[in-house]
Image: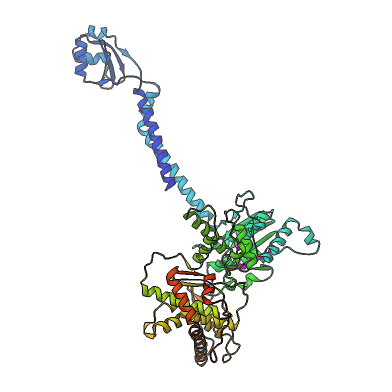
Amino acid sequence: MKNLVKNFILVFLTLVLIAALLSSANLGGQKPEQVSIGRLVEEIQNEQVQGAVIQGDRITVTLKGDEAITLEVRKEPGQSFSELMADYGVDPQKVTRINPEVKDESGWRFWLGIIAPWILPLLLFIVLIYFFTRQVQGVNNKAMGFGQSQAREAKADDKNKKTLKDVAGAKEAKNEVEEVVDFLKDPKKFTDMGAKIPKGLLLMGSPGTGKTLLARAIAGEAGVPFFHISGSEFVEMFVGVGASRVRDLFNKAKKAAPAILFIDEIDAVGRKRGAGLGGSHDEREQTLNQILVEMDGFDPNLGVIVIAATNRPDVLDPALLRPGRFDRRVVIDLPDIEDREQILGVHAGNKPLAKDVSLRKIAERTPGFSGADLANLLNEAAILAVRINKKKISETEILQSIEKVLLGPEKRGKIMSDRDKEMTAYHEAGHAVVGHFLPNCDPVRKVSIIGRGMAGGYTLSMPDKDVSYRTLARFKDEIAMALGGFVTEKMVYGDDQLSTGPSSDLKKATQIARSMVIKYGMSDKIGPRQFAENEEMIFLAQEIHDKKNYSEKTAELIDSEIDRILAEALKVSEHIITKYRPQMDKLVKELLEKETVEEDVFKRIMGEGVEHVVEKAGKA
């Protein structure tokens, strides 16, 4: 559309220029008045004509007087002026007095008048054909470029250049990458020991852990050409395009060798082959086959290191993962507390933080946050500080942003009835009290009845330190805490007044109990066996799960064990809420007055002398 408008403007300007040239003949004086031969004869008879010019079939005469008036008369071609006057009976002496002047038609105006009627349409046609041809050539060039790779080379002078210093945490991953970069900078010290350069480096990790950032840092560190492309850019609707682009991509990298080739989200083309009906050989599989050949096929692939990133290593084809293609697999885990503190320091570098902000405290309050989550957290805090016209970001804005990232924005505009508000307060107080008095639950940091996201209220509990493994006792306490809201509503309002509020809690508790039985072997009756570990079947882009690898009798046993775990947790929750009902009522009163209770106030309500343990009732 843009090119069409441009071409239309050019053609329009050309036509305007031609029109100006054609009209230039009359720019020097007044245009003659067109009259009949009778008028000319009358003026000659009255001796009002001063002079006459005959040029072809056109007669131009000038009348006498103070103001020069020019008349123009058309005569028949081939008839002389004297014959015309004689035919009209004009006195020859009067004709002689005006001394008519005969001029031959010549010059550029004459020739322009002859050729213009047919040459201008031809020129216009040629101009239009020229511009349309250029359009078609552009389309043809794009069509011919379908098989060419869209890989882009990272520029060394990029203003957003990243280095390994900008990557906080991920120490092991950085060490692996530094070896590759060092190999490219000084390969001799490695080859002297008989070491070969790795052909492939696979970065694996959860979304937001910094895989692409690490690749950008490699581009900034390595003094070699760095090509980057996404896995989705290989596959098109035309057969053979993906394989052609792979060949073109590796040819570019080989010409620039030694070079680094980064493929982001390689699982878009690297999924297991033969997953379709009858082991179909579709376009994606052709692309994968070409990648396998280029990385380690018959022809040696020298001087090109392939770095790929994915958060789904479980779906990749085994042939892609073998040594010789991806020699190294680097797992980038979620950052621990030390890494989170370093990441926060990087992202806080360009933000004005108040003196009361402790990055260590923020790192303690953000377990399970990825690098991208932490960057988003500080950005939300900065936006919140601007909204309330603050010059610096305080700890208050950061803590509010943590809750916003976890649960969503506050819904202060939502109007709740007094009964709903009280029911929400009891529900959240039940979670908080049970979680506080169970030894394996995370400490309660905040309780609020202000809705956030999909939640009508929330109880925020965070661990003091990172937890790598979750034990059987921890799972049981987490289920009991999740059921605390359900138990409280039932005890306070009775069975007839149970609401839909605990639905998400029941879902969470059931999922934990089911995982304990079928995944983690935490059931004495079932034993150390894992169930429902099925091979993933993919057909027509749909994943078919739930292919049972156990009998119906075992399924009944699994259901009974899940019921037993939930029943035991329910008894524990009931025991705690009954025992510490006075503290819960105080917490509810505080919530109804303040709407939010912070950690220090919560601990004071629970009582300083109360230990963080509970005597379990019965077998629970």
Where 519 sits versus 307, above or below?
below
* Coloring basis for residues: rainbow
x and y, in percent, of residue 457 in the image: 45, 72
Q: Is residue 534 visible?
A: no
Q: Residue at x 40, y 24 (%)?
A: 108
Q: Where does the C terminus fall, quadrant-wise?
A: bottom right
Q: How many marks?
A: 0
In front: 66, or 556? Answer: 556
Q: Is residue 200 magenta?
A: yes
Corner quadrant of residue 355? bottom right
In front: 354, or 521? Answer: 354
Which residues fall within the magenta stretch?
Answer: 199-211
x and y, in percent, of residue 444 in the image: 54, 73
Q: Residue at x 39, y 85 (%)?
A: 495
Q: Is residue 463 visible?
A: yes
In front: 284, or 531? Answer: 531
Q: Residue at x 54, y 70 (%)?
A: 600
Extreme right residue here? Answer: 192
Q: Is residue 390 magenta?
A: no
x and y, in percent, of residue 306 in the image: 65, 62
In front: 276, or 267? Answer: 267
x and y, in percent, of residue 614 in the image: 56, 84
